[in-house]
Amino acid sequence: MTDRRQVLQAIAALGSVGLPLPGRAWGAPPALPDDPFRLGVASGYPTADSVVLWTRLAPQPLAPQGGMPPSRYAVHWEVATDAAMTHTVAHGTTSADPTWAHSVHVRVQGLQPQCDYWYRFTAAGHRSPAARTRTLPAQGAQVAALNLAVACCQNYEQGHYAAYRHIAADAPDLVLHLGDYIYEYGINPNALRQHNSAEIHTLDEYRARYALYKTDTSLQAAHAASPWMATWDDHEVANDYAGLTSPDHEDPAVFLARRTAAYRAYFEHMPLPPECAPRGHRMSIATQALCGDLASLCLLDQRQFRSHHPDTMLGAAQERWLTQRLQATRSRWTFLAQGTVVSHLLERRDGELRYGSDNWNAYPAARQRLIDTLQQSRVTNPVVLTGDVHAFIVGQVTVTPERPESTMVAAEFVATSISSGARPQRLMDEWQRDNANLRYCAGEKRGYLRLALRPDRLQVDLVALDDARDPQSGRYVLKSCIVEAGRPDIQIA
Ligand SMILES: [Fe+2]
């Protein structure tokens, strides 16, 4: 015999992400007097025939629970082929559940490849603005061009998000975010604008921090202009953490609870596929996107499975997965997108040249295995896209760092921060002097990378802001780099 209570228990056990609302079994939830779409809408993880739609109901973003009653709400979504939403091609209803902070993650299927679509949500009598998204090219299709933006490191206190206004204006086919979407730190009273609490540790605190960041209208505009794919770095949890280890030597059980809360809040606030919902302290975010015959893009997780000792960055399972993906790829260009610098990088510490403790150079065996895999899998035109250092870096991943041209394995482009603090140019000049494989380093500019990919060449513009302290800042191309297909070289102009 199945009674209503058992059905409810069964539904609860399934986890409630994106579950269809079963009629009116719960009764009507309380009305929402204020607009619940104040965190914006987003899309992500496109394939040739699908895309994920995201929103989170939060009429008072910074209040506990985003100002939402502890009820489940029906959320209607629509997808159309025009910005006015007149030609609807898909629609449905899902639920926003308080156990997932009233976030919504829907994968819409049955779309056409390489097409623009617009989407919007309706909940409790409120309607969100319509936003644009785009599907990827069909597998194996000949693709003439692909435009990407690469962003990372957006400390809310240290700058405005003018870079995102420009990314929104570019409306690339895809935005890649390579980590530090939030910072966990407390309030600096002297900062340009302030965080909303002391350093964050609990689920409610991580949720409120994402809500603060997502109230920024420039960030919302970039989400509303293009689909995103994202990976995290350290600050989504805690500075320089590795796997289950906190660098501050927090009690392991306490840190595990913190990481569990942080991963859950990350899922709740990113346009991730429903199946990425975390299970306890684990969450699977590494993924591959295929863009016709032009590009394969592997997005790596170099935090969750990192060992404390210099052994692994990706963990054995992700390494095996990456090797299989690289061996199977037939794309003309192969991108690895992830958080920390892969290029050989010696830094001066107390007059001595040493490797930093947080990037791939601190994990020499793992780094060597990555280089071996890139070489042995014979992928064509590998390019590494990186974040973390708050500087533009154009580097060559090499077998022998002293002979960069003759032993280059991949080009590496490091995106500077959207807003997070600068690195002194004096230090950047030192890095370049001490590392022949680094071709260009600029630490005092905020901005992003703009990639224009064609079958025969990749152009990477280092787009810099005039002043990240100004929300209306202009932008300019600091340097423009060209990688020609089949040539192990980077031209910088
Ligand atoms: Fe950062």
Image (cartoon, rainbow, N blue to C red):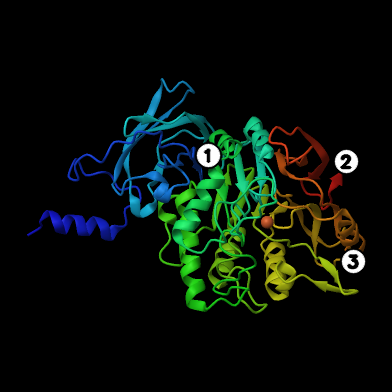
Q: Which residue is mark 2?
A: 493
The amino acid on which the numbered mark 2 sits, given as a three-letter code, is Ala
The amino acid on which the numbered mark 3 sits, given as a three-letter code, is Glu
Horizontal arrangement in the rendering, residue 58 relative to residue 24 (left or right): right
Looking at the rendered structure, which numbered label has been put on residue 406? none
Q: Which residue is mark 1?
A: 138
Q: Quadrant of the C terminus?
A: top right
The amino acid on which the numbered mark 1 sits, given as a three-letter code, is Ala
Q: Position of residue 70 (x, y in %)?
A: 30, 49
Q: Which residue is mark 3?
A: 402
Q: Label 3, label 1: how many angstroms apart (C-alpha)?
A: 41 Å
Circle nearer the viewer, 3 or 2: 2
Q: Label 2, label 1: how many angstroms apart (C-alpha)?
A: 34 Å
Ligand 1 visible in quadrant: bottom right
Residue sitting at x 68%, y 77%:
310
Q: Position of residue 201 (x, y in %)?
A: 51, 64
Secondary structure found at label 1 = loop
Circle nearer the viewer, 2 or 1: 2
Which residue occupies the extreme front position in the image? 189
Quadrant location of residue 402? bottom right
Comes first in the chain, label 3 or label 2: 3
Check if mark 3's residue and mark 1's residue have beta carbons within 8 Å: no
Q: Label 3, label 2: how many angstroms apart (C-alpha)?
A: 23 Å
Between 447 and 143, the one lying in front of the other is 447
